[in-house]
Image (tube, rainbow, N blue to C red):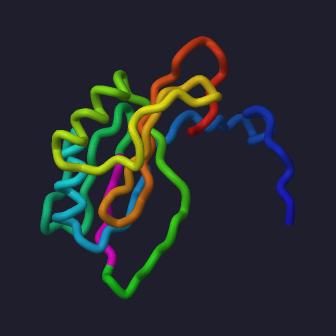
Amino acid sequence: MSAKPVRDSADRGGAAIESISAVTLATHDMARALRFYLALGFPLRYGGESAQFSSFSAGNACLNLIAEGTDRAWSWWGRVIFYVSDVDALYRHAVDQGLQPDFSPRDATWNERYFHISDPDGHELSFAKHLGNDSATAS
C-alpha cells in the first residue's frame, strides 16, 4: 500500500502539522533512565524514579519515559534528534557526568555539528546544531 504525498495543509482539509508535542520512549528501569536524562540536563516536569510515566522538558516539546516490563523487548528503532545551543559543551557535560557518547562531536555534510549517545535502554539520541544557512536534514 502506498500513500499519496501530502504537499500542503489544503490536502489535509486545512489541518496543518505544526509541531511535535512529545516523544515517548519505553524503559525497563525508570530510576536508571531518569538518572541518565537528568545527568544530560533534561528538566523533569512530571514523574520520578518510582513512577510508571515521567516527562522532561525538551524545548517546546516533551521527552517522556514509560515503564515497560522486562518481558517486552525492543531493538534499534531510529533516533531522536535534539537541537542544542552548544553541541561541544553538552558533549563535555555528558562526559563529565560519566556518560559515554558514541563519538565526539563532528561536522556533518548536511551542515550540522552533532554527536550521538544511547540511553540505558538502547534508545539512540542525537544532539545537533545547524552550522549555517543551508537547509539542514536530520542527523
Front one among 24 and 128: 128
Residue sitting at x 46%, y 33%: 114
Question: Residue at point 23% right, 42% down?
Answer: 95
Rendered-image quadrant of the C terminus: top right
Query: Residue at the location (57% across, 34% down)?
Result: 18
Picture quadrant of residue 16 = top right
Position of 54 compared to 106: left or right?
A: left
Q: Farthest top residue? A: 133
> Left or right: where does residue 48 sit relative to residue 1?
left
Residue 72 vertical placement versus 22 (above, below): below
Dividing the picture into quadrants, the one containing residue 39 is top left
The stretch in magenta equals 63-68
Classify the position of the N terminus by image quarter: bottom right
Position of residue 11 relative to residue 120, above or below, is above
Residue 90 or residue 84, whichever sits in front: 90
Q: Nearer the viewer, residue 102 or 66?
A: 102
Pinpoint residue 26: horizontal percent, then vertical percent: 37, 66
Residue 70 sits above or below residue 125 on the image: below
Q: In this view, does 34 lie to the left or right of 12?
A: left
- The image shows a total of numbered marks equal to 0
Image coords of residue 100 (percent x, y): 29, 50
Q: Which of 97 and 53 is in front in this view?
A: 97
Residue at x-position 13% and y-position 68%: 50
Q: In this view, does 64 lie above or below 17?
A: below
Residue 81 in the image: state x and y as whole percent. Answer: 48, 41
**Residue 27, x across and y down, in percent:** 32, 68
Q: Which secondary structure class fits the magenta region best?
A: strand
Would residue 134 be found to the left or right of residue 124 on screen? right
Query: Would residue 131 be counted in the magenta stretch?
Result: no
